[in-house]
């Protein structure tokens, strides 16, 4: 043997002896510092550290590992592991690839915490959004007597569970098992995730799993697989969900879904790094079908939800929970017990506007772009045939634009904006009624025919503040106008509106079907502090000119209107008997108010003052109405009436 060979042999023997007698615990300090730097948490190794190098599968065991919480989470530990054992293949390691043959974890215990501001004690990043964890491939993964707890203060979720992964199948063909229970909003919650044994796993062979979650009356099941085991950035599953209200899924998903009637849905869920997709979503919400595709991107500052949804047949009352109301509760209706209570209370109180508070924190928690289309609508208070809306939510500002509701003739379209960025939500709406017909929206019929027919347009432009529909309307400011021109009305009804009762009833009894033109009709309400005040109600027919006055109080939900008719055939004196509508909006009382005999000679001045604002009102609702011949003639008559009154006043 040469001298050089002897030296190499001696060094090899010395290295072998050194490795054999070396106390690997010397490396605990450097390993603690390295792990602490990587996790941004204090990591401590209180037990022994042992390394086995003389193998094609070198291994290491570490005992009594603990990870500290960040300072905001308190003095308790984030987690601990009694014993961690790892074996890796030597050859791939030489080329920089980690191929674990064994990963064994004894008695792991972790307490995960999320506070009300959204901070998470398991977030080891430096504040930047990172991709989900990708573990290196593990041939055999074992977990013994694991414990997991979870507390989310913002979502009010508490969970305590046990986790294990065995070498052989356990009960029910389960090798991997996470089972636990807790509460969501103080309601019982149970979760179970199972899979086959994490043994002899191949990177190219998908790993199957099943999941089941019960939270109160919400029930979710899923069956899926991880295409590349331990790459948790990508997996897929087919899931079914049913429950009393989609909004109840927020604590489980972090996605702010609207309040709905009871639902039953199914879809294929795919996770692709930071994006979750729900493909082929289908099922029912209330008594309406729902289908479409949904995606949620969790990589932004706030989750971003994008969805394209559709219903072949929408039951109109299923929209009630969106605004804090409830669906109908009659036979055949789908409604949760809580919603049934709301419905009974609103009926007992004769309430139209629900007062359920809006949870603005959920609106601020995410962004969204959602399109929805209803191909048909049934059971509507007015005849709606279809509808569509696009809702965009950005940093607490929600814009529904366009909103479109189709009628048998005409449509309603416009926009609604909800600003939840401030302490008190503010709502602005601007909706127009276009190209519609009176007989479509107000189907007054007599003896088999429509009593009133004609074109109808309108506009509602209102702003309000409050965290409920009731508070918003109770503080509303703006204007509401409906108008018509070139229609027709049965003469009998025209005479009754003018309170020529004898003639009107005579025509009805004779079943007279003759009509008279509606030259121009306008109802305009100025709204301030939730009170709609009639600043102009005019109904101009052949024999009668009707004017109206009064208020609609949106806060108390009461109406007090008077309609007074004026026969166009001048009479020195005639009885003006107003028609009145008063009482709760949900059940107004109609009647005739007896009054003194009023000289008609002084009516002209009042009519002139009444009709003069039409020049400003008509362009607000429809610029074309101001140019309509009959409405223009009515405005001209207002000027003439005013001039005549002034002349009479000067003569006196």
Image (cartoon, helix red, strand yellow):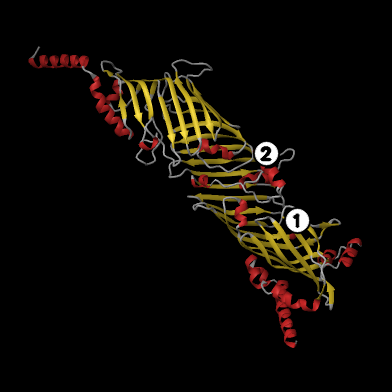
From the image, which quarter does the C terminus lie in? bottom right
The reply to whether residue 429 is in sight is yes
Q: Residues within 10 Å of mark 2 (few under 14, many from 20)?
A: many
Horizontally, is 99 left or right of 29 in the view? Answer: right
Kindly identify the residue that appears in the image at 49 percent across and 16 percent down: 170
- Left/right of residue 197 with respect to residue 314 in the rendered view: left
Q: Based on the displayed image, in which of its 4 quarters is residue 600 positioned?
A: bottom right
Q: Position of residue 612 (x, y in %)?
A: 68, 74
397 versus 479 height, above or below: above
Residue drawn at the location 72% of the way across and 74% of the way down: 634
The residue mark sitting in front, 1 or 2, is: 1
Q: Quadrant of residue 113?
A: top left
- Which residue has dot 2 on it? 335
Relative to 154, 555 lies left or right: right
Q: Work out whether residue 336 can be spotted.
A: no
Query: Which residue is at the front of the view, 32 or 452?
Result: 32
Asked if the residues shown at circle 1 and circle 2 are in contact, with their CB atoms under 8 angstroms apart, the answer is no
Please determine whether, in this image, residue 135 is positioned above or below residue 480.
above
**Residue with the most extreme top position:** 1
Mark 1: few/some/many CA within 10 Å (<14, 14-19, 20+): some
User: How far across and how far down the image is residue 628, in percent?
Assistant: 69, 71
Tally of numbered tags: 2
Please give left or right for residue 565 compared with residue 255 in the image.
Answer: right
Q: Residue furthest right?
A: 510
Mark 2 residue element: loop
Query: Observer-nearest residue: 497 or 492?
Result: 497
Tag 1 secondary structure: loop
Residue receiving disc 1? 588
Horizontal and vertical percent position of residue 456: 71, 62
Distance between mark 1 and mark 2 Cα atoms: 28 Å
Q: Looking at this view, name the residue that lies furthest to the bottom.
A: 651
Instruction: Tell me the tag on residue 179.
Output: none
């Amino acid at each position: 043997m040469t001298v050089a060979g002897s030296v190499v042999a001696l060094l090899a023997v010395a290295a072998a002896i050194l490795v054999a007698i070396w106390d690997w615990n010397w490396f605990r300090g450097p390993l603690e510092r390295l792990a602490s730097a990587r996790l941004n948490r204090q990591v401590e190794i209180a037990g022994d550290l042992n390394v086995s190098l003389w193998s094609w599968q070198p291994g290491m065991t570490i005992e009594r590992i603990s990870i500290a919480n960040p300072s905001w989470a308190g003095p308790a530990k984030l987690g601990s592991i009694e014993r961690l054992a790892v074996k890796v293949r030597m050859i791939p390691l030489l080329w920089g690839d980690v191929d674990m043959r064994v990963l064994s974890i004894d008695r792991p215990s972790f307490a995960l915490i999320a506070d009300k501001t959204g901070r998470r004690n398991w977030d080891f990043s430096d504040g930047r959004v990172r991709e989900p964890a990708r573990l290196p491939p593990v041939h055999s993964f074992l977990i013994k007597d694991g414990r997991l707890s979870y507390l989310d203060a913002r979502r009010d979720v508490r969970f305590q569970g046990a986790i294990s992964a065995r070498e052989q199948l356990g009960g029910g063909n389960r090798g991997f098992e996470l089972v636990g229970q807790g509460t969501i909003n103080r309601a019982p919650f149970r979760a179970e995730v199972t899979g086959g044994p994490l043994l002899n796993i191949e990177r190219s062979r998908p790993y199957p799993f099943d999941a089941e979650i019960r939270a109160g009356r919400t029930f979710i099941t899923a069956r899926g697989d991880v295409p590349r085991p331990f790459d948790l950035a990508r997996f897929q599953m087919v899931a079914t969900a049913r429950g009393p209200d989609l909004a109840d899924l927020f604590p489980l998903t972090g996605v702010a879904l609207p309040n709905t009637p009871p639902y039953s849905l199914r879809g294929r869920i795919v996770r692709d790094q930071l994006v979750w997709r729900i493909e082929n979503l289908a099922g029912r919400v209330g008594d309406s079908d729902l289908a479409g595709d949904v995606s949620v991107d969790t990589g932004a500052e706030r989750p971003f939800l994008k969805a394209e949804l559709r219903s072949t047949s929408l039951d109109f009352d299923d929209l009630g929970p969106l605004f804090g109301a409830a669906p109908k509760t009659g036979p055949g209706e789908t409604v949760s017990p809580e919603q049934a209570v709301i419905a009974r209370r609103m009926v007992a109180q004769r309430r139209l506007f629900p007062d359920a508070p809006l949870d603005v924190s959920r609106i601020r928690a995410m962004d969204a772009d959602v399109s929805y289309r209803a191909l048909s609508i049934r059971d509507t208070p007015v005849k709606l045939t279809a509808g569509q809306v696009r809702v965009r939510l950005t940093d607490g500002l929600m814009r529904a634009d366009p909103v479109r509701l189709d009628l048998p003739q005409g449509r309603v379209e416009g926009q609604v904006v909800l600003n939840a960025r401030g302490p008190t939500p503010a709502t602005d709406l601007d909706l127009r009624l276009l190209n519609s017909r009176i007989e479509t929206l107000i189907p007054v019929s007599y003896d088999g025919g429509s009593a009133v027919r004609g074109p109808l347009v309108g506009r509602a432009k209102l702003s309000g503040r409050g965290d409920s529909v009731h508070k918003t309307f109770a503080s509303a400011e703006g204007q509401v106008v409906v108008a018509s021109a070139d229609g027709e009305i049965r003469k009998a009804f025209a005479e009754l509106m003018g309170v020529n009762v004898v003639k009107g009833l005579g025509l009805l009894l004779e079943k007279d079907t003759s009509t008279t033109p509606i030259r121009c009709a306008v109802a305009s309400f100025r709204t301030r502090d939730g009170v709609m005040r009639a600043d102009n109600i005019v109904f101009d027919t052949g024999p009668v000119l009707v004017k109206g006055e009064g208020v609609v109080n949106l806060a108390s939900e009461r109406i007090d209107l008077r309609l007074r008719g004026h026969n166009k055939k001048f009479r020195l004196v005639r009885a003006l008997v107003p028609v009145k509508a008063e009482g709760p909006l949900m059940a107004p009382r109609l009647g005739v108010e007896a009054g003194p005999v009023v000289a008609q000679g002084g009516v002209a001045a009042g009519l002139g003052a009444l009709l003069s604002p039409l020049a400003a009102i008509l362009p607000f609702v429809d610029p074309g109405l101001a140019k309509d011949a009959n409405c223009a003639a009515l405005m001209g008559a207002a000027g003439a009436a005013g001039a005549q009154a002034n002349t009479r006043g000067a003569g006196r």
